[in-house]
Image (cartoon, rainbow, N blue to C red):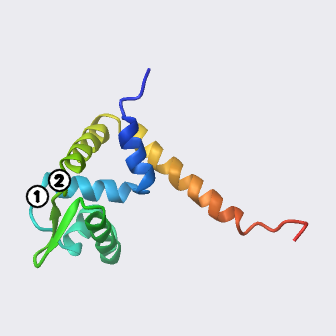
Amino acid sequence: MTSAVSDRLRLYLRVHALTVPHVEALLLLRADRTWWLPPRLASRLYVPEPRANDLLVDLAGLQIAETGQLGYRFHPETPDLEALSEELADAWAHRLAEVAGMIHDQTDAAATTFAAAFRFRKDS
């Protein structure tokens, strides 16, 4: 069975190191295209407000959300980002385990690499 998740989406998730909370935040903003503030996002994702704020800032930095006086809202800056967001929503709805597994695999790999830097070696 071949993967329904495109290489393009896999690359996007890997390059931008999106986490599950990032994806869930993106999907919430996409579904309700009104303005979001950190307290609202925090209550929907069950994360602390500072984490929700970081997620919103990250999505704005990725040009998926725009900022304004009223907060943040879903507004991809390019048609390609809009299409990737749609593809991600579809993959999350139909291939959740696969997408979540890809995200966790990259997180685990990054943590392993980071931890390796602190291993004591006999020759040191």
**Residue located beneath label 1 in the image:** 33
Q: Residue at x 36, y 35 (%)?
A: 6
Q: Marks 1 and 2: in contact by CB < 8 Å?
A: yes
Can you say whether 109 is above or below 95 in the image? Answer: below
**Res. 39 image quadrant:** bottom left
Q: Quadrant of the N terminus?
A: top left
Which residue: 33% across, 59% down?
22
Can you identify the residue that label 2 sits on?
A: 30
Does residue 122 appear left or right of residue 40 in this picture?
right
Question: Looking at this view, is 40 or 99 the one in front?
Answer: 99
Q: Is residue 65 left or right of residue 2?
A: left
Q: Is residue 97 visible?
A: no
**Residue 47 at x, y percent in the picture:** 34, 68
Amino acid type at mark 1: Arg
Cα distance between the residues tagged 2 and 1 = 6 Å
Q: Quadrant of the C terminus?
A: bottom right
Q: Residue at x 27, y 39 (%)?
A: 93
Q: Can you give x and y, in whole percent of width and height, for residue 64 in the image?
A: 23, 59
